[in-house]
Each structure stands twice: as C-alpha cells, then as structure tokens.
Image: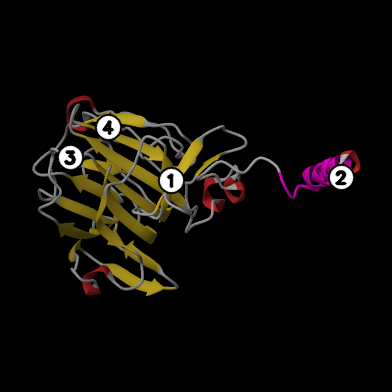
Amino acid sequence: MRRTAILALCLLSGLLLAGTLGPAPSEGASAACSEADYASLPSGEADGTTCEAQDTGIVWRYSTVAALWLSTDMAPASLLISYEGTALPTAETPAWTKISVAAYSEAVSGGVLTVSDDDSSGYVYYQIVNAGLVNTKRWALVIRSKVNSQGSTVGNVGFKAFAAMRPASEQIGALGFACAAALSTGVNVRPSGSSGTPGPAGTVWTPDNAVWKVWIMAWDPAVKTYYMEELGTGVRSACLIAGGTAIFPANSISFGASTTVSTASLDVDYIRVFEW
C-alpha cells in the first residue's frame, strides 16, 4: 500500500513538472493575445476574452459584436452600422449616399476602399442616416483607415474630417478635425496619438501619413461629450460639442476625404458603429 502511494505521488509530481497537469488557465484568458502591439491582436476570439499588453499594461477585451478588441469599459450591446470595404459604399445594402464637390476618384481592392479628393477645394463623403442613432444612447464609431495626405484648417468645421458622427440633431463629432469649440475659440483638437500639433485657426493639421490606424470616437449622452482615442494607446481625448453642423445631417455617419490646401486620399478597411 505504501509503495503504491509513493509511486502515485511520483507520477503526479512528474506530470506537474511536465506541464500536463496544473492550474487551469482563467476563463476567457488568451495566451495568444499577449502582444504589445494592438494591430497584432488576433481576431475571432471568444466574447469577453481579455489580454494585457506587455509594454503598456492596457487590458483589452474582445467583443464578438464589434469583432474588435476594446477597452474593458466598453461592452457593445449591438452593431448598428458597418462597412467592411468589400464593395463601394453606394453598392452596399443599405446603400450609403455619396456627396461630392469637384473631382474625386474611388476604388475597392482587396477589401480596402480608396477614395480621393482630387481637388484642393473639394470633398467626397459617404454618409448613411439611421434613425436608431439617437442622442440618448452611448455610441461608438471605430474606423481602421490610412490617411495618405490631408490638409485642413479650422475655418470650416466638419468639412475636413475623415469620419464624423451626429447622433440625432446634436453637433457633430469628427475624427481628423476640430471637435472642441472650434468656431468660438479657434482651437484645433486632434485625436490622441496622431502626429501634428493643435493650433489656432488657420493652422494645418496633418495625421500620420500612409500609416494604418484604428480610431474610436465615442458619444456619451450624459455629458454630451465625444471621446477620441487611437486604439492601442489607451489615452482618450475628451471633446465637447461645439461648432457648425456642416454637411452632416441628423442621425448620420459619414466618412471620406476633404481638404482646402491639397489633395487628400483615404484608405478604409472597415467602419463600425455600435451601442456600448
């Protein structure tokens, strides 16, 4: 009996050392997602799977609703709008409306939409109106895009954005352009993590050129504020609503290219809007 017990103990010790047995991984954890770079995190994980970036300590949680890794304070309830770059937005169901001034070009290749404003005083936007985009709920817009060239000034609020959101008839929130009291104070507020420096009215804001970025812009109705963040940085910029409504109607989502000082080209991999 004693000899059998010793043999059993030795076998168990060997298995523990070999890694065959031992503490089970925590539920929802994923060893594969312990990368420091947000862009390298794997897709298709189980809903609620979490991981911690090794260099920043940011904890991400995977959402199957948004098909994205998001901050742990965001738990998407439903996907309202999405565009995945598989066809021109005007050929989607439901179709996006294209609005443009002056020359432009558009093409889809390899799951990426490329749209260019080919005139220094024009713009081209795709926008969709959805009555569900009310101002009493929390909404988040996520876009993976690459701005190949962009010039903008604070003089025409809303026209120089590469993505914009307007819940109900609220003032717009815009990525790539002023979102905080632009008309009254002339301050150009940029999303955190982008290149360029906020400046007074008339200064040029230039995003990182030819670099893929994942941006998020979230609407909080409790304080009537947009939060902006380059995903992967964990740093948010809060932007109070102000400025004109420009060409963006109520309950709308828009994206595209526009500039007053040079041509602008935007590559879009996807855009998703969800309640959180």
Comparing 103 with 45, the one in front is: 45
Q: Earlier in the sequence, mark 2 or mark 4?
A: 2
The residue at the far right in this view is: 3
- Mark in front: 2 vs 4: 2
Which segment did they paint magenta?
A: 4-21
Whether label 1 touches label 2, CB < 8 Å: no
Of labels 3 and 2, earlier in sequence is 2
Q: Residue, x 18% and y 28% (percent of image)?
A: 222
The disc label shown at residue 65, or none: none
**Where is 263 relative to 7, above or below?**
below
Q: Position of residue 13 (x, y in %)?
A: 82, 41
- SS at circle 2: helix
Secondary element type, mark 1: loop
Q: Residue furthest front?
A: 1
Q: Which mark is first along the chain, 1 or 4?
A: 1
Q: CA distance from mark 3 to mark 4?
A: 32 Å
| Residue at image point 18% right, 69% down | 95
Which label sits on residue 4? Answer: 2
Which residue is label 1 attached to?
48
> Marks 4 and 1, Cα distance to the nearest angstrom?
43 Å
Instruction: Tell me the amino acid under the disc marked 1.
Output: Gly
Residue 106 lies within the magenta run: no
Q: Amino acid at mark 4?
A: Ala
Q: Nearer the viewer, mark 4 or mark 1?
A: 1
Q: Tell me, for residue 137, which label it has, or none.
A: 3
Magenta span dominant secondary structure: helix
